[in-house]
Image (cartoon, helix red, strand yellow):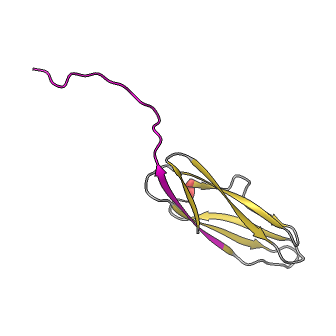
Amino acid sequence: TIEFTGALHATVVKQVRLKNPSSKTLMYNAILAGRDADDFSLPKGNTVTIAPKRQTSINVEFTSRFLRPAEAVLLLISKSVGGIDGATLSFSLKSEVKHIEPADILKCKSPCYEL
């Protein structure tokens, strides 16, 4: 589970580190699925390539629109490269709004009542 914690309407970025222990290049197609998948994004695109014996990180961004917790799933589905397939990976994405920043403060004067 990857947890995104921040203020309402703030954008939180988390990194997912992927390692390739094999001697062949691995490619993955990243998919965001679930009830709140539209609130999560992959700014570097949906294709991830990991060179042999290397590691890479992908950024996952979340922008909160509501006070309720958001949930989605990040699926990394392997694409065959030279006959090599990696394992399908899945990560649970969850958010929590910890505080609310006011967008603006308005001062108003008004009588308490009128006869």
Q: Main secondary structure of the magenta part?
A: loop
Q: Residue at x 54, y 51 (%)?
A: 6
Q: How many marks?
A: 0
Q: Is residue 91 magenta?
A: yes
Quadrant assignment for the C terminus: top left
Q: x, y (%) of residue 99? A: 46, 48
Q: Residue furthest left?
A: 115
Q: Residue at x 49, y 47 (%)?
A: 8
Quadrant assignment for the N terminus: bottom right
Instruction: In the rendered view, tell whether residue 110 sits above or below residue 71.
Output: above
Q: Is residue 51 left or right of residue 90?
A: right
* The magenta segment: 90-115
Q: Is residue 47 left or right of residue 33?
A: right
Instruction: In the rendered view, tell whether residue 105 sits above or below residue 2.
Output: above
Quarter assignment of residue 3: bottom right
Q: Residue at x 70, y 52 (%)?
A: 43
